[in-house]
Amino acid sequence: MRFDDPAIAAVYRAIFERRDMRHFTSAPVDPAVLARLLRAAHHAPSVGFMQPWRFIRITDPALRTRIHALVEAERRATADALGERQDEFMRLKVEGVRECGELLVVALADGRERHVFGRRTLPEMDLASAACAIQNMWLAARAEGLGMGWVSLFDVDALRTLLGMPDGAKPIAVLCLGHVDAFYAKPMLEEERWAARMPVEACLFENGWNGAPTESAEPAEPTDSGAFPKF
């Protein structure tokens, strides 16, 4: 059954107004809201219904500080690898680990090798499934008026050891979640002129890579004027 028009508009609004947030207030997150967000994440699709995601809530301030140190170390290593864009990168705010109301680490569970359904030729579908859970939480957070930021700047082995994860488990995200003074009008990296959003036409092909024509099909001429809502 089709959602009613206001519900449809709300879904698209959450999608188009979601932002990867880096600036937070220190106000606490309502436990009931956090529970709803985790439930939304847990209802994500997963290949073979493997549900590979595990969430670790960080409530120890000292542990939060150590996680921030890991992120900062990788931020500097990333800057060193960027060459001529090093200084530009170092001016960016790339995380909100210390100030966000809630800090969560998302990991892939151990024992994933036993899940073959849908992963025999694409073993990385465990990561894709966990990313769906994160996206669910992100959209639900935006609907709740909370910001969220996905931080991937950390040494995987160091974070795994710090949090006592079992062999085979793998951290994939540090999620900063919390109240914000305002959501960015555009993605922060676009506002900072680090990168620009590609037009949807550049990502949509038909009947072959880059729309290569075949004997049975004419090249597609997709347009971004009407088929996709503009927010």
Image (cartoon, grey):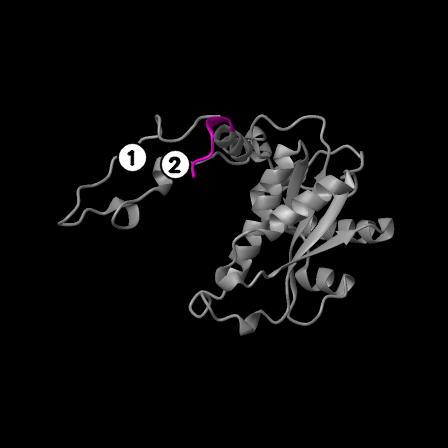
Q: Is residue 224 left or right of residue 55?
A: left
Tell me the quarter of the image containing the N terminus.
Answer: top left
Mark 1 crowdedness (10 Å alpha carbons): few <14, some 14-19, many ≥20 = few
Q: Main secondary structure of the magenta part?
A: loop
Residue under numbered circle 1: 222
Q: Where is residue 185 drawn, in percent x and y?
A: 58, 25
Which of these two is toward me, 11 or 176?
A: 11
Residue range in magenta is: 1-6
| Residue 197 visible, this angle | yes
Residue type, numbered disc 1: Pro
Tell me the quarter of the picture where residue 160 sits: bottom right
Q: Earlier in the sequence, mark 1 or mark 2?
A: 2
Specify the farthest residue to the front. 1
SS at mark 2? helix
Q: Is residue 227 above or below residue 170?
A: above
| Residue 79 visible, this angle | no
Residue under numbered circle 2: 200
Residue type, numbered disc 2: Val
